[in-house]
């Protein structure tokens, strides 16, 4: 399949700087309609589903699924594998347990990149699933929205819950909170770095046009102005 560049209007919606506590997140997740369809489209061409859909190759074909990310790879009742789907479906397995002690964060970035690569493929549709389609698979999709679309954790949960009820276990929520804080810190550092770069550039511009009283503490630059003494003391 050929790769295409995709820019979605949904991208970059996250702006929350404070990460809710696990207790607050549980309250948010618990609300609304509980359980529902075996599979739901939660983002353009991105589906979350359970094993009943994933184990049914006819359903996969009917949905037009071209990529499968199995968040319960090798676990009981989840049949997914390269052999099971054949050459028509690209398969990626994550051997996660739905246990609060399992470190699913080890797979956040690799899974997010796999989802993004799939969605950048022309006419592709990806199913992310686990056994029930509410915890492991949902956690990986939330991480994807946070990493590649700059959503905060709260905004990502809100977005997915518009289409499907999800409920990552408390251990996964702690790991998603840690990711949220990490990404927010990176965003802040990038913003501060951009400001510092602009400030340094601004001083270089001042020096280059002959305003010698503007001197950068970070640059060993000297400038001799041809202006009059009066002009050199302008505020």
Image (cartoon, grey):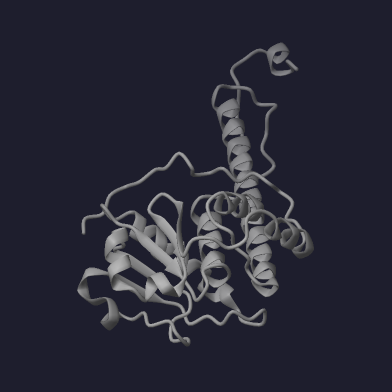
> What is the x, y in percent for residue 160?
55, 54
The C terminus sits in image quarter: top right
Residue 215 relative to residue 8: left or right: right
> What is the x, y in percent for residue 154?
66, 53
Task: Give the residue displayed 42% in from the left and 42% down from the top.
Answer: 8
Q: How many marks?
A: 0
Task: Give the residue displayed 61% in from the left and 38% down from the top.
Answer: 200
> What is the x, y in percent for residue 28?
71, 56
The N terminus sits in image quarter: bottom left
Q: Is residue 208 above or below residue 20?
A: above
Q: Quadrant of residue 127?
A: bottom left
Residue 217 versus residue 189: which sits nearer the camera? 189
Q: Quadrant of residue 105?
A: bottom right
Residue 133 versus residue 212: which sits nearer the camera? 133
Residue 86 relative to residue 77: left or right: left
Q: Is residue 112 above or below residue 8?
A: below
Residue 219 appears in view: no
């Amino acid at each position: 399949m050929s790769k295409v560049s995709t820019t979605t209007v949904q991208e970059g919606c996250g702006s929350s700087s404070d990460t809710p506590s696990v207790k607050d997140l549980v309250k948010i997740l618990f609300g609304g309609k509980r359980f529902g369809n075996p599979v739901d489209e939660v983002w353009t061409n991105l589906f979350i589903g359970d094993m009943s859909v994933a184990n049914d190759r006819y359903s996969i074909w009917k949905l037009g699924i071209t990529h499968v990310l199995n968040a319960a790879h090798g676990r009981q009742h989840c049949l997914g594998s390269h052999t099971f789907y054949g050459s028509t479906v690209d398969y990626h397995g994550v051997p996660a347990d739905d246990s609060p002690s399992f470190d699913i964060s080890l797979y956040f970035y690799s899974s997010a990149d796999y989802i993004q690569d799939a969605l950048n493929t022309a006419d592709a549709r990806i199913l992310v699933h686990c056994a029930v389609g509410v915890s492991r698979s949902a956690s990986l999709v939330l991480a994807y929205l946070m990493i590649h679309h700059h959503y905060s954790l709260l905004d990502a949960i809100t977005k997915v819950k518009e289409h499907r009820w999800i409920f990552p276990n408390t251990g996964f929520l702690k790991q998603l909170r840690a990711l949220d804080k990490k990404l927010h810190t990176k965003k802040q550092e990038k913003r501060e770095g951009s400001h510092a770069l602009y400030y340094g550039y601004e001083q270089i511009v001042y020096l280059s046009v002959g305003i010698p009283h503007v001197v950068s503490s970070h640059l060993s630059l000297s400038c001799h102005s041809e202006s009059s003494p009066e002009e050199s003391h302008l505020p």
